[in-house]
């Protein structure tokens, strides 16, 4: 008789604790909560948090990196995708713009100082070429002045008419002044030829307007040279009019040059601005609008130029967002013929374009620590124009000729108006 075996014992699977979301309490299925999107990996470690932040910054798949990369190399596609709903994985345009502005002013406040920007440098041959051109131009001017004086001396009216006599005196003053210019240019050329070969390291302004070596301005655009030109103009006016009193425009020009050419290591840009405003408006400004309450609020702040400039410098970054409403009307006007676009499209375009300008300016500011602005400005303008061209073309699906024409119109006409409107708005909001 066969033995009947007992049925095998059924082994129950091990019980597992069901994980729930720490944020909303829903059951977790996978790495993220299907309700609120929070990750299942929750920690309370400071080191892990720092590691997560660093990983998100350098991660090639991060939203910031992907957005900036597309903004630089495919701006039109980025704008068009965002407008038509492809937004996962990209930073919103307003967020990117605000973050870039915040980084710009943070970088300036923490890093940029009076000695931050590199000065323009020249080779000896470049300086010689410029000095030779100055000598040639000064000699040609002197030759023309002498010829004019000879013609005037041969005029029969000289000595008979006061106007002809004053004209001769003005010509003699011009000849004397031009002779001094020739001598100065020749002396400057001789000093440059005595310099060591190669690139000359010297102090100078970042824009390359002047170049100081051992206390001598080798380009002829420094304070002393400009003051000499102002004095020459004043001498000519005195010789022609017979009035020894210095004209008011000459005095203002001389004081303006002295203020602008102050040492940047001792006087900041805002200090120079306050001094210039005090020079031309000693008692400040006064506005008269149809609203008395607004006049009472604005005018006290405009009476003290130094206090106003200080307030403007400290609060200007707070109004950086105004560049968007200042530019938006011109973008709308530029594309008013496009019936397939909406205001939202122009807002996204303007925000991404403004963010690009801020990011590019940050990059060039970093480079300006080693390379002078005089060598960078041309590239900055070229990059911004090319970016605007491709941004317009691909964001609004235009032809090359149409995009080129709109870029030209915006750069020549609308951009200066937008910049003026932006600064006017910042000044007005600072004053109130």
Image (cartoon, rainbow, N blue to C red):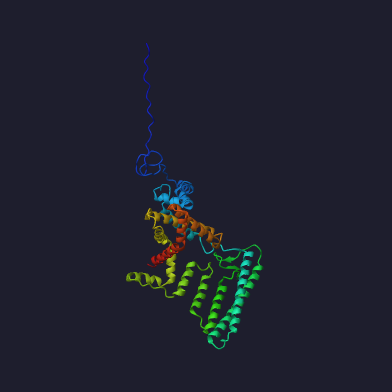
Work out whether 18 lies above or below 74.
Answer: above
The x and y percentages for residue 128 are: 63, 67
The x and y percentages for residue 397 are: 43, 52
- Which image quadrant for residue 427? bottom left
The image quadrant where one finds the C terminus is: bottom left
- Which image quadrant for residue 229? bottom right
Residue 362 visible in this rendered orientation of the protein: no
Residue drawn 40% across the image and 39% down it:
30
- Which image quadrant for residue 138? bottom right
The x and y percentages for residue 153 are: 59, 84
Residue drawn 56% across the image and 61% down it:
375
The x and y percentages for residue 220 are: 59, 71
Looking at the image, which residue sits at the far top? 1
Work out whether 197 lies above or below 29.
Answer: below
- 275 or 372: nearer the eye? 372
Residue drawn 48% across the image and 53% down it:
72
Q: What is the tally of numbered marks visible in this picture?
A: 0
- 82 or 340: nearer the eye? 340
Q: Is residue 129 left or right of residue 97?
A: right
Residue drawn 37% across the image and 70% down it:
298
Residue 285 visible in this rendered orientation of the protein: yes
- 253 or 282: nearer the eye? 253
Q: Is residue 85 left or right of residue 264?
A: left
The image quadrant where one finds the N terminus is: top left
């Amino acid at each position: 008789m066969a033995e009947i075996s007992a049925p095998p014992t059924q082994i129950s699977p091990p019980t597992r604790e069901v994980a729930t979301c720490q944020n909303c309490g829903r059951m977790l299925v996978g790495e993220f909560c299907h309700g609120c999107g929070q990750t299942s990996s929750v920690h309370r470690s400071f080191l892990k948090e720092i590691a997560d932040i660093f990983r998100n910054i350098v991660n090639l798949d991060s939203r910031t990196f992907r957005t900036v990369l597309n903004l630089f190399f495919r701006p039109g596609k980025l704008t068009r995708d965002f407008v038509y709903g492809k937004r996962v994985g990209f930073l919103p345009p307003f967020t990117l713009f605000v973050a870039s502005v915040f980084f710009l002013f943070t970088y300036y406040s923490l890093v940029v100082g009076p000695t931050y920007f590199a000065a323009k440098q020249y080779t000896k041959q470049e300086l010689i070429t410029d000095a030779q051109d100055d000598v040639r131009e000064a000699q040609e001017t002197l030759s023309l002045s002498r010829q004019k004086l000879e013609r005037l001396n041969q005029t029969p009216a000289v000595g008979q008419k006061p106007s002809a006599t004053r004209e001769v005196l003005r010509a003699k003053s011009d000849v004397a002044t031009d002779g001094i210019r020739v001598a100065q240019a020749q002396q400057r050329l001789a000093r440059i030829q005595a310099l060591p070969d190669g690139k000359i390291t010297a102090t100078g302004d970042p824009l390359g307007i002047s170049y100081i070596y051992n206390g001598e301005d080798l380009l002829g655009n420094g304070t002393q040279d400009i003051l000499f030109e102002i004095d020459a103009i004043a001498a000519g006016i005195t010789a022609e009019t017979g009035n020894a009193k210095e004209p008011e425009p000459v005095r203002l020009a001389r004081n303006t040059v002295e203020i602008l050419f102050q040492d940047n290591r001792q006087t900041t840009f805002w200090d120079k601005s306050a001094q210039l405003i005090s020079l031309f408006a000693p008692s400040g400004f006064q506005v008269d609008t149809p609203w008395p309450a607004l006049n009472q609020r604005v005018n006290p702040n405009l009476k003290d130029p130094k206090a106003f400039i200080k307030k403007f410098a400290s609060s200007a970054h707070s109004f950086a967002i105004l560049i968007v409403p200042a530019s938006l009307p011109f973008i709308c006007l530029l594309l008013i013929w496009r019936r397939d676009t909406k205001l939202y499209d122009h807002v996204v375009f303007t925000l991404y374009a403004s963010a690009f300008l801020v990011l590019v300016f940050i990059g060039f500011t970093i480079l300006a620590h080693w390379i002078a602005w005089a060598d960078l400005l041309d590239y900055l303008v070229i990059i911004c124009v090319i970016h605007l061209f491709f941004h317009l073309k691909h964001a609004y699906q235009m032809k090359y000729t149409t995009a080129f024409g709109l870029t030209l119109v915006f750069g020549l006409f609308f951009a200066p108006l937008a910049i003026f409107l932006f600064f006017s708005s910042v000044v007005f909001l600072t004053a109130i």
